[in-house]
Amino acid sequence: MHHTRNRPWSISLHLLRLLCFFALISPAYAADVQPPASPERIKFFENKVRPLLADNCFSCHAEKKQKGQLRLDSLEAVLKGGKNGVVMTPGKPESSRLITAINYKDEDLQMPPDGQLAAEQIQILTDWIKMGAPWSDTPTATTPLKGKHRTINDADRAFWSFQPVKNPSVPSVPDQASWCKTPVDNFILAKLEAESLTPAPEAERIALIRRATFDLHGLPPTPEEVDAFVNDASPAAYDKLIDRLLASPRYGEHWARHWLDVVRYAESDGFKQDAYRPNAWRYRDYVVKAFNDDKPYDRFVREQLAGDEIAPNEPDVIVATGYLRHGGYEYNQRDVPKQWQQILDDVTDVTGDAFLGLSMGCARCHDHKFDPILQADYYRLQSFLAPMVQRDDVPLATETQKADHAAKMDVWLATAAPIQEQIKAIERSAFEKNTAAFIKKFPPEMQAIIHKPAAERSPLEEQWAELAIRQINDQTENPQPKLPAAEQEKYSALKKQLTELEAERPKPLAQGLLVSDVGTTPPQVVLPNDPAHPLEPKYLSVLENQNLVLPVITPTATTTGRRTALANWLTQPDHPLTTRVIVNRIWQYHFGKGLVATSSDFGRLGSPPSHPDLLDYLAHRFVETDWSIKQMQRLIMTSATYRQSALRPMPEQARVKDPENRWLWRMNSRRLDAEQVRDSILAASGELKLGTGGPGSDLNDTRRTIYTKTTRNNRDPLLDVFDAPESYGSIPARNVTTTATQALFMMNANWPLKRASALAARVQHEALSADPAAVVTAAYRHAFGRVPSATETEAALTFLQSRHSKSPATQPTDTEPGLIDFCHALLNSNEFIYVD
């Protein structure tokens, strides 16, 4: 039997019902009913909102100063408002004056007055008010109160995620031992039996190959691949399928996207200008190759944090430090120290999220309210990363390649250098004038640092100066001097000569977005409002009593060595967090939810593991198999647990005890991710281009989505409606929404209509006959990987006959409009968008 979620040609009726449902939910009702302050919302406040208010508002609207009689350091004060009235209404950002003020739409109230917040920050405050303005009762001071520092106690250290990883015995399940295919099944079955539940039967073969192919490739299987698997009667057919999928280059292209979500990858700056980053894609290609090569995860982590220190002369390694470059950037942020601190906060937060599974950002302004993470822990972690500087000028080349290129450049410069010098001499006056005018846009104290000789700057001042000079260079390049006619003629002739020589110039070496250190002397890191006491790098206090080796910080010839020490600490085999976090992420991407449902929060606000012994078994096995992600996937995907059917009706015992299927008495059905939706449509229509790597393509290209430009603001509308992330922060799991805009886009937008037309032309050509039933079968095979039932074929033929064109085709190859509509309906169906 096969499963059809709903008749594809009934979509209009379903859409109408959906729209009627949404019409019943008035905006007023949605705003008036406030959700409770759940732990997730409190976490959002502590991690995102409070630091933003502290950095931008408390200096004028807190305990020491209340401009306009307005305080913003407690919920009570925010709700009270100031002398001009209420500034915020929970649940109603559109009518909250605070939102109007930060958008600079209120002439009488613009906050902050010294410069508008970034778009991401405005969105954070808007989302906070929309969710009801949750607030915790943490002390409002931006530094810990005297006598109220948090202390780390034995109860903190006893929390499950801070305990050493165990090596539990595989449970014995003698009654159903034959069901188990890998040790994973013993753990799952033991829990099911304890709750008087039983597993579902194995899924049908078409469902299995579709599930496995989407999980590993992010694409549907071809009809030929389905036929080969369904007709393979050998006992090893399924194992061979998994091995084939893991060996394909399509595997890395899909699994890289999971990691890129976690590290907030994008190819644009974000915020208002959203400038494109032309070399960001090289990090994306590094990640794709790392997954295809099954690079050991401990090496993968170390290269991203410290590739330039580990192997400074290996271009395939130093490119990994692009991990530290994916944060947003404001081209016109003249408060350089503030922007640099935001950059450091961003990489600190993402490092905590991605590798430790802890929300470190909650400790930015004060000791963590819920988890045993001190404010000092946050900045001590940051001190490992603080020496970095952003580098766009490091060639991704070997020493031999660099030397060869330099030799060729010397030959070219012998002719070009005299012309270049003459051009620069003419441009110098305009360049200096432009530069001087631009530097004056910075605050006086920043101007002084820019003008200070580099040898006299402190390490932190040097970092600030480099960030400021980046702005200066971006805004003052290609000066246009105003010249007398005679000199202008000479200048134009020189420019023409140089242009003619450009054809002979050696092509520049590849470059990426990388980092190195400001030098061997690190900048000081201090607690906010406590600059007199610099902090040294230190690992989390709550893990101090663990039997973890504390790596020694060993400077290199050009760097502090701090990032290498951090990477070595994170990748110790017995680290209690690193291995648990990554195997849980792997599990999540196969089952839709991790053993720990909150895959980037292993703290007290997160979910406890549903199967703690299984989590530890997987973490321990992961290290034993050389940190191999592919080996872990083989273990999980060849299990009977993974092969269960998703179509099992809910047993009464499950309805009472486990309606959410946390104990896995069946497989979970899942909607495709945004990229999978787009790529699957292109695969079905026959238009998908399978290539590897290189610069991001235009969004209208038909390459795999991972190879199209990933921009934060100028987003692809299809990806947008299907919940692709904005990449402003680490994304542990995608939102999965069901909205009217998804159906409306798929039904009415030009892009899906073109793909439906291409699919119709494809199946009409492949049917090789005028038999409409053959056309219907071909369409089903490309859309769903199966043949239609007799009932489906009959319904499809009836529909096609009713839509048959009454006028003769103008060309023999014209596609019937009815067939296009039919294919369009298939691409809109739930069976196409969901995987069982």
Image (spheres, grey):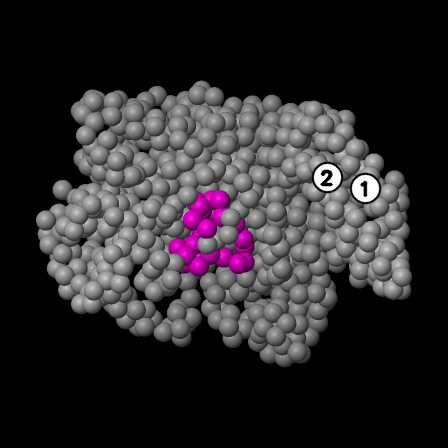
Name the residue at the front extreme: 811
269 with respect to 630 (left or right): right
759 with respect to 491 (left or right): left
Q: Are marks 2 and 1 in contact (CB under 8 Å)?
A: yes
Comes first in the chain, label 2 or label 1: 1
Return the x and y of residue 792 as percentages of the image width and height.
Answer: 14, 52
- Is residue 299 or residue 244 the one in the foreground? 244
User: Can residue 440 be seen in the rendering of this structure?
Assistant: no
Distance of mark 2 from mark 1, alpha carbons? Answer: 9 Å
Numbered range of the magenta stretch: 701-724
Residue 68 is a magenta residue:
no
SS for callout 1: helix
Picture disc at residue 505: 2
> What kind of residue is marked 2?
Arg
Q: Residue at x 89, y 45 (%)?
A: 453
Return the x and y of residue 205 as percentages of the image width and height.
Answer: 21, 35
Total of numbered circles in the picture?
2
Relative height, residue 495 to residue 211 (above, below): below
Picture disc at residue 416: 1
- Is residue 632 or residue 812 the one in the foreground? 812
SS for callout 2: loop
**Image quadrant where one finds the C terminus:** top left
- Is residue 603 or residue 579 the one in the foreground? 579
The quadrant where residue 195 appears? top left
Q: Residue at x 51, y 38 (%)?
A: 693
User: Can residue 31 be seen in the rendering of this structure?
Assistant: yes
Assess disc 1: are there few (<14), some (14-19) or many (≥20) residues with their C-alpha within 10 Å of its C-alpha.
Answer: some
Q: Residue at x 30, y 72 (%)?
A: 24
6 with respect to 504 (left or right): left
Assess disc 2: are there few (<14), some (14-19) or many (≥20) residues with their C-alpha within 10 Å of its C-alpha.
Answer: some
Per the picture, the main secondary structure of the magenta-coloured stretch is loop
- Is residue 240 or residue 161 the one in the foreground? 240
